[in-house]
Amino acid sequence: MIKQNAVSYSRVSTEDENQATSIVNQQKDSKLAIEQNGWNFVDSYVDDGKSGTTTKNRNEYNRLVQDLETDKFDIIVCKSQDRLNRNTFEWYNFTNKLLVNGKKLYFYLDRKFYNPDEDALISGITAIMDETYSRNLSKKINNAHKRRQESGDIVILTNDTYGYRKVNKQVVVDESEAKMIRLIYELSTQNVGTRSIAKQLESMGYRNRNGNRIAEQTINKIIRNPLYKGTAVMNKYHKDFNTKKTIKNPKSEWIYRDGLVPQIVDDELWQKANDAMDRRTQQYTTDEYKKIIAGAKNNLSPFSSKIVCGICGNRYWRKGKTMVRGYIYHWECSEYTTHGRKTKTNRSPKNAKKEMLHIDNTGCDNIRFQDADFNDIVYQIAQRLFGGKENENIAITMEILKKVIQNNDTIEAQQKELTNKLKSIENNRKTLLDRYLADKINDDIYQSRDNDFQKEIDNIKNEIEILESQKVESEDREKRIQRIEQEIKEIADVELSIKNTAEHITLVTAYPDKLVFSFDLFDEIVVQIKKINYRKSEYHLC
């Protein structure tokens, strides 16, 4: 008989794992299980210090999923289900790929294979429990972080916090930057806008931490930041469990702490500068009765701030101009917009000297591309992600998930049964107490039986809580599935397709020969660019 090939998968999260269940032990136990079953050990996949609630940045897990479609192995050996996924959606997505490609999954802790016919529902509940555990852990971490900010005196300085630095864990004023901060506030009180302030700072030799021009957005943040009048604002953000992103909290939850840092500007100057900015952004009504906010940018693209230059790291800006065929938008690196090309080309002005294009290492040579071309690329990506045969697996997974979330009736029946059992045990415990008080049983027997009753009660209450959390999770998941289904139905509409896909795009990195799309839920997609001439390029999805 030909031996079957097996691989092992191991994962440890630094948040909830101890030394007893470390990566080393998982690898050792997996290999032992493979030897005992007479399989050939082929490869191991190890994710160290990675959360199981998402597949993002789990390089080895993603490599394992890719290898599922090959003949590299027949069996995956893993400690338990939660090592693979603590996310219900991802768990069913994984098991579906397992079945489609004819692979087996062996849990060495239980010494058994995963059986989709028998284990689908149980594993679904287990995945929900694992996800609930991780969700609760996330809440505890966020709450602990909030309590530290309410009572502590530690101020976090980010990389874009100008004017301050830390010395022996104490925040002190950096006078070399504080002069620039005071100048920004003074100019704002004189009704100078952020764009003009940026130009003036550049002419005076001020640069950001990367040696580039200080952006208008940075100046805006400086003026609005109460830190410069000595007030630290805490609890502005939290880590969202579902999206794995840092989310801004509503202002009602912000924590304001006065006196934690020294003032760079006094309260009066800070308020005058902010009042002046408020006046520059007041809402007014046009002759056509349209409400406009002064200084606000209209007709923003859903990709604004999501496209970055792969050469210099600056953001891409969406620019427009009137052409023969109408008003046309295109995207270009903001460094190019501000300083032009870094090197001279045959299209540069005749009197432009090559060395003049290298002053202060400014300018950028990266590509420009038409907004219409970019939207067409995103629509093609939408078709790949949501439409056609490529996503039959997603549709199948959604069907499986629907079956899991339709268990609320079953859950309620289980809750009712557990509640009745709880009442029965509590009555028996009361009877035990009555017999003890009547001197019908001795102390040892009473204590032993009472402890047993208490353990049963605690276990049942815990089971009821778990079922309740599953019911809530099912309701949330149903809404998510409905949203995804709606996105698939809208795929025929180009504009809606682009809008829906934009919500999943986290970053687009532009290079001279390619665009790299990063997503929150999907794998990275690369679009190759072939330059035809100055105005035209061809784009091909890899």
Image: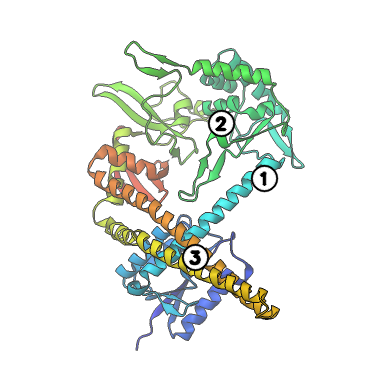
The image shows residue 251 at horizontal and vertical percentages of 55, 33
- The residue drawn where x is 33% and y is 22% is 321
- The residue drawn where x is 35% and y is 61% is 409
Residue identifier under label 2: 212
Please give left or right for residue 190 compared with residue 87 in the image: right
Residue identifier under label 1: 148
The image shows residue 131 at horizontal and vertical percentages of 47, 59
- Which circle, 1 or 2, is nearer the viewer? 1
The answer to whether marks 1 and 2 mark residues whose Cβ atoms lie closer than 8 Å is no
Label 3 Cα neighbours within 10 Å, binned few <14 / some 14-19 / many ≥20: some
Label 1 Cα neighbours within 10 Å, binned few <14 / some 14-19 / many ≥20: few
Q: Which mark is residue 463?
A: 3
Is residue 373 in view? Answer: yes
- Which circle, 3 or 1, is nearer the viewer? 3
> CA separation, marks 2 and 3?
58 Å
The image shows residue 9 at horizontal and vertical percentages of 47, 70
Amino acid at the residue labelled 2: Asn
